[in-house]
Image (spheres, rainbow, N blue to C red):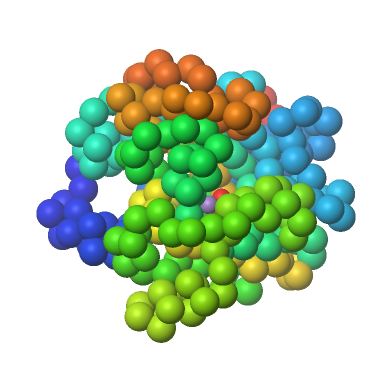
Amino acid sequence: MPLSPAQLKAFDEDGYLFLPDCFSGEEVAALRREAELIYHSGRPEVWQEKSGAPRTAFAAHTYNEGFRLLGSHPRLIEPVEQLFGEKLYMHQFKVNAKAAFDGDVWQWHQDYGTWARDDGMPEPRAMNISVFLDEVMPINGPLMFIPKSHKHGVLPAGHDEATTSYPLWTLDHETITRLVDAAGIVAPTGKPGAVLMFHGNLVHASTANITPYPRKIVYLTLCAVSNYIRKPTRPEWIAHRDFTPIEPVADDALLQYARSHRIAAE
Ligand code: SIN
Ligand code: MN
């Protein structure tokens, strides 16, 4: 379903949109199981926390059928095509674990800051669209956004290679304090199957997860095809070089997959 004028206005003003109930519990249950298998597969695309717990699995849409279908799903592709007014390719795809007890922080950052500095992406015409695989609660490390912070362009950042296992261009405390004083912090929560889309320059972070509740979220980074990256420095499975426009699958493809998968698993 296309985004309504009210949704487009809210996205422009606040920099994010929350779409609860985008996927059914049945559609995401199979992906949740697949994610756990991938985390323990020993694949090189799976990144660990300093503790050894899984942090993220990159590029799962290239080696797992369920995630391939999610990565081409019309409920995710069409709203972003509508916003950018052109076809999209997959710049990055990751399944973040935020594991029970051991899930580490993501420091305050802007995604486009990394895409511009590390990948040579010309414009912030790419964005993350995230799908909750587990319930995201106030207590298990939800994504935190500073509303309206996307209006400030690319903010100065330092390259943090020490805090977590994952290098990130992070913002300093003065900048965060100034932005939060102006607009506060929101942390949208919801059931598995909810979707959060957010502007490439929206400032965000998440805290550690010390609860027994894992918080898996899939992130599709969808980039307008004309905005393909010019100077990649990261491995292909982190910043893809396949700029082929994504052709959406049928709306019920993931449901059919989940049903056949469940039957096969029983
Ligand atoms: C990210 O910002 O890329 C990930 C944040 C999170 O999963 O909490
Ligand atoms: Mn991010």
**Percent x, y for residue 169?**
58, 53
Viewer-side residue, 130 vs 167: 167
Relative to 42, does residue 159 appear above or below in the rendering?
below
Side of 246 relative to 96 (left or right): left
Find residue 80 and report its image quarter: top left
Side of 109 relative to 103 (left or right): left
Side of 50 relative to 249 (left or right): right
User: Does residue 99 appear in this view?
Assistant: no
**Percent x, y for residue 199?**
36, 52
State the residue at coordinates (24%, 28%): 86
State the residue at coordinates (52%, 45%): 114
Viewer-side residue, 175 vs 64: 175
Viewer-side residue, 228 vs 175: 175
Placement of the C terminus among the 4 image quadrants? top right
Relative to 186, does residue 170 appear above or below in the rendering?
above
User: Does residue 145 appear in this view?
Assistant: yes
State the residue at coordinates (35%, 78%): 183
Relative to 58, does residue 114 appear above or below in the rendering?
below
**Percent x, y for residue 230?**
45, 25
Viewer-side residue, 36 vs 159: 159
Find residue 89 and report its image quarter: top left
State the residue at coordinates (76%, 70%): 210
Extreme-left residue of the structure: 5
Placement of the N terminus among the 4 image quadrants? top left
